Image (tube, rainbow, N blue to C red):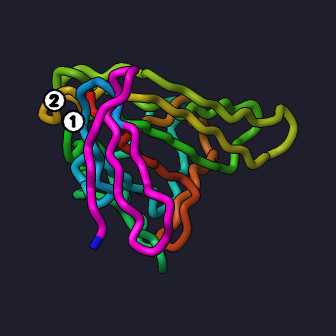
Amino acid sequence: MSQVKISGNASGTGVLTIAAPNTNTDRTINIPDSTGTILDTGNTTFFGADQWRLTANITASGGTFNYDLTSNLERVDSTGAGYLGTGMTESSGIFTFPNTGIWLIQFAGRGNIQRADNVGFHIQRTTDNSSYDTVAYGDACGDDSVLGTGGATAFFIFDVTDVSTHKVKFRIESFNDGSVLMGDSSETRTGMLFQRLGDT
């Protein structure tokens, strides 16, 4: 049977020693003189990841305008896809986090862009569950003479201290007549990625 011994050294670091059951070399773990938590990789409150996408194309009409993505959104459900933890919840384009923490948000999209159009991809956040501001932006530019295909990515690290007030949504800007934002229900063409990096 293996034996476990806990001791200290001259530098103040705790040492956890496990007597090796099958070799002559003991295994040691150095424990720093500080407070903290040993993470369990199965702890889905600490670790979290989720991915969502637009399921249908959006074709602009009526001139230049700002367009919030409020419908045709789904968690990615292609074969082999998954998520970690409870996952995000979405209602009319507003995304709510499952728990507080430091979250990395990425928004990437692709479209057929009309001549001289400039399509902006916005990540917008609120900290009062009311007013939203753009915190990250990427854009794809069309050519003056030809219809082109382009894409953009925006990303933001969000300190979510309260899940009832800290939320995000996604917006397309300067979307001119005939430009198409690509969406699909079987592969991600325009999508959002959420990853929890650590505690707030």
Instruction: Choose top left, top right, bottom left or bottom right for residue 27.
Output: bottom left
Q: Give the numbered dot on residue 100.
A: 1
Element carrying mark 1: loop
The quadrant of the picture occupied by the C terminus is top left
Label 1: how many Cα within 10 Å (few below 14, some 14–19, many 20+): many
Please give the range of residues in magenta. 2-30
Q: Nearer the viewer, residue 75 or 132?
A: 75
Q: List the residue tagged with mark 2.
A: 162
The quadrant of the picture occupied by the N terminus is bottom left
**Pointer 2 with pointer 1, Cβ within 8 A:** yes
Q: Residue furthest bottom?
A: 79
Q: Position of residue 194 (x, y in %)?
A: 40, 46
Residue 67 appears anywhere in the view: yes
Query: For residue 11: magenta?
Result: yes
Q: Earlier in the sequence, mark 2 or mark 1?
A: 1
Q: Residue furthest right?
A: 145
